[in-house]
Amino acid sequence: MVQPTPAAAPGQTPGTSDAAQGMNVKARTQTQLVIRRFLRHRGAIAGMALLFFVIALAVTSIGAGPIPGWWDKNHIGTADLVNGGRPTLGLWPGFLGGGGVHLGEHPFGQDNIGRDYFAVVMRGTQVSLVIAVIVGVVATAVGTVIGAVAGYFRGAAEATLMRATDLMITIPTLLFAAMVAVMWGNQNIVTLGLVLGAVTWTQTARLVRGEVLALREKEFVEAARSVGTSAARIIFKHLLPNVIGIIVVSVTLAISSAILLESALSFLGLGVQAPDTSLGKIINEYRTAMMTRPWLFYWPGAFIIATALSINFIGDGLRDAFDPRQNRVRA
Amino acid sequence: MLAFITRRLVTSVLIFFSATFVVYIMAANLGDPLADLRELPPQDREAAIADRTERMNLDKPVVARYFLWLGGVLTGDLGTNRVGQDVNLMLERALGATLQLVLAATVLSIVIGVGIGVISALRQYSALDLGVTFGVFVCFSLPVFWVATLLKQYGAIEFNDWLADPSLAWWVIGLIALFMGAVFSSLLVTDRRTRLMAFGVAAAVTAVLLAVLSATAWFADPGLGPIVIGLTAGAAAVGFATLFSGLEWNPTMKAAAICAALGLVSHFALLPFLDDPTWWFMGLLALLTVAICWAVGYFVGGELYRRSAVPVSILTGLFTAAVIFVDRMLQSFASFSESVRGRPISTIGASTPNYSGSFWDHGLDSFGSLILPTMALLLISLASYTRYSRASMLEVMNQDYVRTARAKGLPERTVILRHAFRNGLIPITTLVAFDIGTVLGGAVIIETVFGWRAMGDLLITGINERDPNPVMAFFLVAGTAIVVFNMIADIVYAYLDPRIRLS
Amino acid sequence: MSMNTPIDPSAALATSSAATDALAESAEEVHTAYTLADSKPPLDEEVLRVENLTVEFPTDEGSVKAVRGVSYTVRAREVLGIVGESGSGKSVSSMAVMGLLPRSARVRGRVLYRGQDLLAMRPKQQRSLRGRKIAMVFQDPMTSLNPVHTVGDQLAEAVLAHELVPRAKAMARAKEMLELVGIPQADRRLRAYPHEFSGGMRQRVVIAMAIINDPDVIIADEPTTALDVTVQAQILEKLLEVKDAVNAAVVMITHDLGVIAGMAHRTLVMYAGKPVEIGATDEVFYRPHMPYTAGLLGSIPSMEGDRTERLRPIVGTPPSLIHLPQGCPFTPRCPLATDECRENEPELLPVPGATGKAGDTPAPSGAGPIGEHRAACHHSDRLGAAEDATVFFRTEAELRAEREEGR
C-alpha cells in the first residue's frame, strides 16, 4: 500500500536529477537485458571465441563451396612422409628457447599413406558441424511444435503426442539413431542430419510442453482465446515467443549432443559413409594407430571436444541470460 | 499409491509393446539381408538364398514376421539369427557382462555424482565448486569412444607395463599431493589460515604415503594389513557417527566404535575361512554383520540414541566388512597378476577366457576387465548426476523450510541431511529413468572399444547384417531396463514425496 | 484438504479486490476478540537489546547497505512493531538477530540477549539459543514447513534439537502445542503432512513450533501477509495469546500499519535501512514526527470523516541501497525537504516534549529510554506543531506537486 507504482513517479521534479539521488532506473528491454547478462558470462564468451575460431579455421583453411581455402593441400591427395608423418606445428615461441611458432609442411602430421592430416581433420570438422547444426535445428523445430501442441491442447491430441514421446523414450537413442542412419542416412550428410534430428527431439518436446502447460492458463492466452483467435495463431503468436529462451538454449544443447551422437555413430561405422568423412569416422579409422601415430587419434578428438565444450558453455550462458534465477540444468 | 503404480505399469508395458513393433519394423527394413549371399558363386547361391529366406520368413510380409517373432517371445523363444544360431543362447552369453557394466556404472555414478554435486552445492563458488562445474562441462563434451580408447591405452596397456616396476616419479607424487591438498582445503569453510593448514597437511600426508608406497613397490603386491584396516574402520566409525549425531562421545559414537572393533576382531577370526569362499558365504557374512551391528546399535544406543545409533552401527559394520574384503582381494593380487602374465587390467573381453582360480582370482579378473569400461561409462552419467544434484541442492537450500529448520536451532548437518538432501533427491529420481537409456547406448560403444562380445556386439552385428532378431534381443533387454528403471523412479519418487504418495 | 478453515465469502472477495481496502479491514478486525488491552502488560525485564546493528551485502554492483544502524530493546511480554516498506531493512535486521543471514552478509553491531552478545558468540552457542530462547515465525506458511516430514516430526525435532528427551516425550509436547494454538484432533494431525493443512492451520503449526521450547523472544516476520483476511485476525490473536502463555517478548515485523495499531505496545518505523521514528504506538500514530510516518498513515484509506478525500500515496520509490544519496534518504519524496535535508542525515532524537518511562536507563547508542518518542527529521517540530500531521503532510505534498507542475 505504501509502494507507489512507477506511474506515480511523474509527480517528481524533473529538476532534481534522479541519478544524483541514487534513483537511476534505466529502462531496459528484455532483449537488452538478455544480451547484457550473456556478455557478462565469461564461460559463454570464451565458448563463443573458441567456436568462432574452430568454424573459421574449418571453413577458410580448405575452403567450403564457393569459399576458397588458404591451405594448399586437400584431404585426399598424398605426399611423401615428412619426419615420419609427425606434426610439424610449432607453438613454442623462439624467445623461450623453442623452435618458434610455425605451421610447417604438415601441421597436424600425416597418416600412414601420407595424406595431410590437417586437411583431413578440417574436412571432418566441416562435416561434423554441418550435421550437428542440421540435427540441432530439426530436433528443436520438431520438439518445439510437438511440445507446444501437446501442451496447449487437452484430450486426444495431447494424449497421442505424449504417448508417442513416451514411446520414443523407451527406445535408446543410440539404437534409434543407428537404425534411421542405416536406413536413410547413408546417402549424404544432409539426410543423415535430418533423420538424426527426427529421433532426438524428445528432450525439447518435454521442456517446451512443461512451459506451455504453465503458460496456457495465463490471462493473455485466455484473452486471445475469448476473442476467437485460432489455436495455431495462439500457439505461434502468443505461446512460443514466451518460451523463446528455452528454445534457444535447446538448440545449443541439441547441437552439442548431436556432435557427440554423430561421432559415436560414425565411430561404430553406422554414420557418415565414405567418401565423406567426419571426426568420429576419422577416429575410428585411425584408432589402431594409437600406439604408433598418436597424433592421428588426438587431433580429431580435440576438435570434437573443443566444439562441444564451446557450445555447451554458450548454452549455459544463454540459460543464465534468459532466466538468471533458474537453476535448472539441461534435462 | 498401489493403484498409481499399477496404472503406470500397465501403460509402460503397453508402450513397450508398441515400441517393439516400431523397432521390429525398422530392424526388418534396414536393408537387404541377402546381400552377402548374392555374391556367392551361382551354384550355391540359389540354395543359400532359399535357405535364409525360409529361416527369416522373408517371403512373408513384415507385419506377419513381427507377430511370428512376438509369438515366439511370449513363449520365451527369441528365434535365430540369419545363419541359424539361437538368439536365446547369444543373449544369455551377452547379458551378464553388459548388465554388470551398466549396473556398476549407474550405481557408482548416482552415488559419486550426487555426492560431488551436493558437496559442490554446499560450497558454492569455492574453488572446488568451480572446478567441479568446469569438469562437468568437459565431461558433457567428451566423446565416450575417444575416452574409452584413451583409457585402454593408458589405464590398461601402459598401466600393466608400469606394474612391472611400480614406482612413481617425484613430479607425479607432487601433482597428486597438490590436488589432494586443494580438494581438502576447499572442503572446509573457515578462515584462510586453517585452509592453508589443511592444504599443507593433506598434501604432505598424500606425498609421504605415495612415496612410501612407491618405494616399497606396494602397487605390485598390495594389501592393507590389520593396522590400516583398524585405522580405516575407526575413521569410518567417527565419520558416520559425526554425520548422524555430531562429533561427541555419545552412545552413537560408542556403538560405532564397538562395531569397528568387532570388525577388526573378525578380520583375524575369519582369516582361515576366506581362502576360497563362495558368494553365498559372503552374502551370509554380510547379513550376519548387519544383524550384529543392528543389535549393538539398538542396545548401546538406548532409548535416546537408537535412531542414530542403529544406522551408524550398520554402516560402520558394512564399511569395515568391505575394507576387509578389499584387503583379502588385494592379497591375491600378486599371484593373480602372475597367473595372467603380468597383465591384470584386461584390454579385450569381459573376462579372461578359460581362466580358473580361487574366488579372489575370479573377482580380480572381473574387476580387471570391468574397471576401465565402467570408468568410461561413469563419465557419461556422472556429469549429469553431479550437475543435477548440485542445481537441485542449491534450489532446496534456498527454500523457506530450510530456513525454518535453521531457525529451530538444528545443527547444520541435520538441516542438510534431513531437510535439504531429502528434498533435493526428489527431482534426481526422474533423472535415473532418463539416464539409463543413455548409459545403455554408451555401453554399446564402450564394449566395441574394449572388444566385449556382449549386448553391443549383438546390436552392431545385427544392424550390419540387417538381421532383426539380435537387434530385437538387444531392444528387449534395453527397453525392459528403461521401463523397469522408470518404474523404480516413480516408486522412489512417491516414497520420497508424500504429496504424491497420499494423493 | 479436509481441514480448510471456513472462509467468509465476503472476506475472500475483499482480498481479491483492492489490497488497501482489505488491509484496512484487517486493522479493524484485530480489535474483535483478544486485543492488546486484554493481554498481560509488559514486564520491566529487558530480554533483547539491539545496538547499532548494520548489515551489508557485497554484490557485483557494490555493497548493499541493507541495515544502517538499528537499535531497539524489547521487554518480556512486550510487543514491538517494526514497520516499513519492502527493502527498508526490517526483515534483514531480524534475520541478523536470528543469525540466519547468508555467510556473505557483513553484520556489525551488538545483539544482546539478556546481556549476552549473540554476534560475538561461537556458532554452537548461538545455535543453542536459536529456536530455544529466540524463536521465529515466518511470512509464508505454505513454504516454511518441510513437505516431506510429518508435522509431528517437525515439531518434535525442535524439542530434540535442544533437549535430550525420548522421542515420545517430544511428541507429547508437540501435541500439547498443537492444542494450544487451536488445532483440533491434534493426535491425528501430528501424523499428517503439511500439504494436508490449510494456510491458516499451517501458520498455527509454525507458531506452535516457535513456542514449543518456551522462548523469551518471538520474532514474527510478516506472519499474516500471506493469509486470508479473516485468518489474519485469528493468527494475530493467537500470537498475543501465546505471548502471554510463555511470557515472551514479540518483535512484530510488518508493512501493515493496521496490524501494528492493534498489536504493538511500541512501534519502530524504518526507512532505507534506518529507524526514522520510534515510540509508543499511540504516540507514533497520533503524533508522528517524521514525514515518512505521516505519509504512511496518510496512505491508508480512512473509515471515518470525509470519504470523498483522495488517497495520497507517497510519491517516488525508496532509494537504491547501493548508492545512497547524501543527507536524509527520504528527501526526494519529502514535501518538507530543504537544503539541510539534502546535506545532513538527521539523527534519531527525542521529539519535543517526549516522555520516557521513569527509571529506564538510557541505552548507550541512541535507543533512548524505553518508550521515549524519537524521530529522525530536521523538521519534526513542524510536523509536531501541526494539529493533524497526516493532513499536514498531505497538504504539503499537494502544494509541492502544484509548484512542480507550475514550473
Image (cartoon, rainbow, N blue to C red):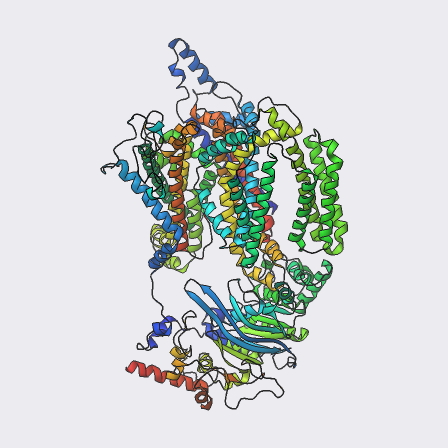
Q: A78 above or below A216?
A: above
| Residue toward you, B24 or A272 | A272
Q: Residue furthest top?
A: B43
> In this rendering, would A220 be left or right of B284?
left
Tell me if B262 is positioned left or right of C314 in this view.
Answer: right
State the image quarter where residue B486 is shown: top right
List the single residue furthest toward the right. Answer: B299
Left or right: where B450 falls relative to A198 = right
Res B493 visible: no
Q: Nearer the viewer, residue C106 or A100?
A: A100
Q: In which quarter of the image is the N terminus of chain C?
A: bottom right
Q: In which quarter of the image is residue A71?
A: top left
* Residue at x-position 47% and y-position 30%: B449
Q: Is C390 located above or below residue B110 in the figure? A: below
Quadrant position of the C terminus of chain C in the picture = bottom left
Where residue C344 sits in the image (x, y, percent)? 42, 81
Identify whether C11 is placed above or below B298.
Answer: below
**Residue C205: x and y, percent?**
62, 65
Tell me if residue A247 comes above or below residue A195 in the rendering.
below
Q: Is residue A147 visible?
A: yes
Give the residue displayed 28% in from the left and 39% down from the top. A59
Q: How many marks?
A: 0
Which percent across, then down, holds residue B96? 57, 29
Q: In which quarter of the image is residue A124?
A: top left
B347 and B141: which is toward the camera: B347
- Percent x, y for residue B110? 55, 43
